Amino acid sequence: MIEIDKSITGKTKLIGLIGNPVEHSISPQLHNTISRHLGREMTYVPFRVEKDDLKDAVKGLKALNFTGFNVTVPFKKEVMKYIDENSKEALLMGAVNTVKNIRGKLYGYNTDGEGFSRAFKEATGTAFRDKKIALLGAGGAARAIAVKLSLEGADSIAVINRTVSRAEDLCELVNNNIRRVAKPYGWDDDTAESVFADSDIIINATSLGMHPDVENYPYVKPIKFRKDQIVYDIIYNPARTRFLQEAERHGCVAVNGLGMLFYQGIYAYEIWTGIKLKEDFLKELFLEFSGLLGVRQKAKLSSKS
């Protein structure tokens, strides 16, 4: 007997992803699992888009009345030109990763900062207000994180980067648009080591140490961690980078970037649908999600938001 597939009908709402490449993305599994659990007729589809076709791709998704879509590399900045209205945070971060179609008008958001913030708090039980923070890196991820840290009341943000001019640019963005809390440092700055020593939280927002280059390190030499520090790495593969392994050996709370990856997707789904996903469901989904990636987050997610 042939069973008729009823998963997609004329009533099915469409969401998706544009980027290049997209073959590795697990966003379809995440979002389609959520829709199935909620009983919503909504399907998520990834689309590989060539650089010269980005404008046409955005116009096409709008014309086809997609509910919304995600944007991944290399288009997070470029796509902003084709969005009708970008959120304040997206403008500050200089990137959009989530787009919502409201009655034919496209609205751009960036959920990376919010995803990072929630994942960090749930894994550590700690917020950023009045904390001294050392941030390694000055690229797109570091920009989103620095903006979020400043908005959430960090006492100071030391941006430490191999190329100091990029650190200076990021600090200027934060200081001129939010609060004067950021200061730049280069790898050859003799005072950077004292910055690490004085920090409550140390964050690696670079790709140094990511698979397959697992021996790479986000600073010119090993950092002398204190056991009362929290150390966060946005990398989730491997689950314990060399950076995190050294932090653990010093007794630090060490957290990888799996939660950030997870929650930036959750926030996108909530933006598209207006639904607040329940905490017990998110806990169970996170465990399945980490298993799909072959990565287990050591710190447990709490029920706090």
Image (cartoon, rainbow, N blue to C red):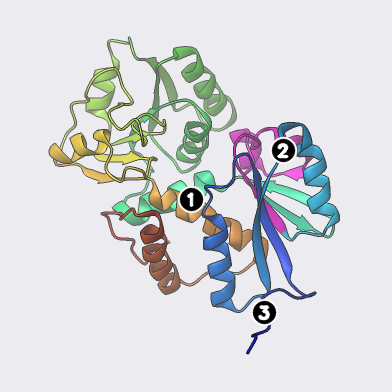
Q: Which residue is mark 1?
A: 115
Q: Is residue 6 above or below residue 131?
A: below
* Tag 2 residue: 79
Between disc 1 and disc 3, whose residue precedes?
3
Res. 209 in view: yes
The residue at 36%/37% (across/down) is 211
Q: Identify residue type, mark 1.
A: Gly
Query: Which of these two is toward me, 106 or 146?
Result: 106
Q: Secondary structure at mark 1?
A: helix
- Crowd band around label 3 with a 10 angstrom C-alpha radius: few (<14), some (14–19), many (20+): few
Earlier-in-chain disc, 3 versus 2: 3
Residue 279 vs 45, above or below: the answer is: below
Marks 1 and 2, Cα distance to the nearest angstrom?
20 Å
Residue 222 part of the magenta segment: no
Percent position of residue 163, x then y:
44, 14
Q: In the rendered image, which quarter contains the C terminus?
A: bottom left
| Segment colored magenta | 68-97
Question: Relative to the observer, which residue lies in front, 1 or 222?
Answer: 1
Between the C-alphas of marks 1 and 3, the distance is 35 Å
Instruction: Establish if 142 lies above or below 230.
Output: above
Splitting the image into 4 quarters, where does residue 6 fall?
A: bottom right
Q: Residue at x 47, y 32 (%)?
A: 142
